[in-house]
Image (cartoon, rainbow, N blue to C red):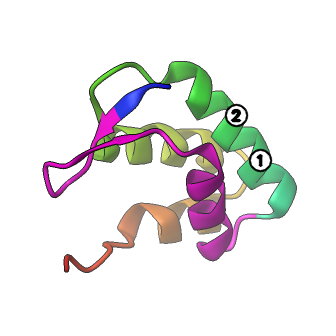
């Protein structure tokens, strides 16, 4: 599995279902979230930053649902 670099600096495995869930929380339809997550999964490379994953997902989602893409792009998860 591909490892990604979190904003905190931690390294974790890429989690496609987690990406899909975050897209849905932003208001993306399930079919759009699934399609975007699958597309992004194919573009994820070892060591990619989660900020880059977010950029890729936003770009993909924008063509399907601009409002959900805007919400997804501007959401910032609070750090612990």
Q: Is residue 68 magenta?
A: no
The picture places residue 23, in percent across and down from the top left corner, at 61, 61
Q: Is residue 53 above or below residue 68?
A: above
Residue at the image point whose x is 41% and y is 48% from the top: 54
Q: Which mark is residue 34?
A: 1
Whether residues under marks 1 and 2 lie with C-beta atoms below 8 angstroms apart, the answer is: yes
Residue at the image point whose x is 77% and y is 40% from the top: 35
Q: Is residue 53 above or below residue 41?
A: below
Q: Quadrant of residue 20?
A: bottom right
- Rate crowding at label 2 as few (under 14), some (14 to 19) or many (20 or more) other CA atoms within 10 Å: some
Residue holding disc 2: 38
Report the residue that reaches farthest toward the left. 9
Measured Cα–Cα span from mark 1 to mark 2: 6 Å
- Which one is nearer the viewer's eye here, 41 or 59? 41
The picture places residue 58, in percent across and down from the top left corner, at 51, 48
Instruction: Specify start and end residues of the magenta stretch as a single range.
Output: 4-28
Residue at the image point whose x is 60% and y is 21% from the top: 42
């Amino acid at each position: 599995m591909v490892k990604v670099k979190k904003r905190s600096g931690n390294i974790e495995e890429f989690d496609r279902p987690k990406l899909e869930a975050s897209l849905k929380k932003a208001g993306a339809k399930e079919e759009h979230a699934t399609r975007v997550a699958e597309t992004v999964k194919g573009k994820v490379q070892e060591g990619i930053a989660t900020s880059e994953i977010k950029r890729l997902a936003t770009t993909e989602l924008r063509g399907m649902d601009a409002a959900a893409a805007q919400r997804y792009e501007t959401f910032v998860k609070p750090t612990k």
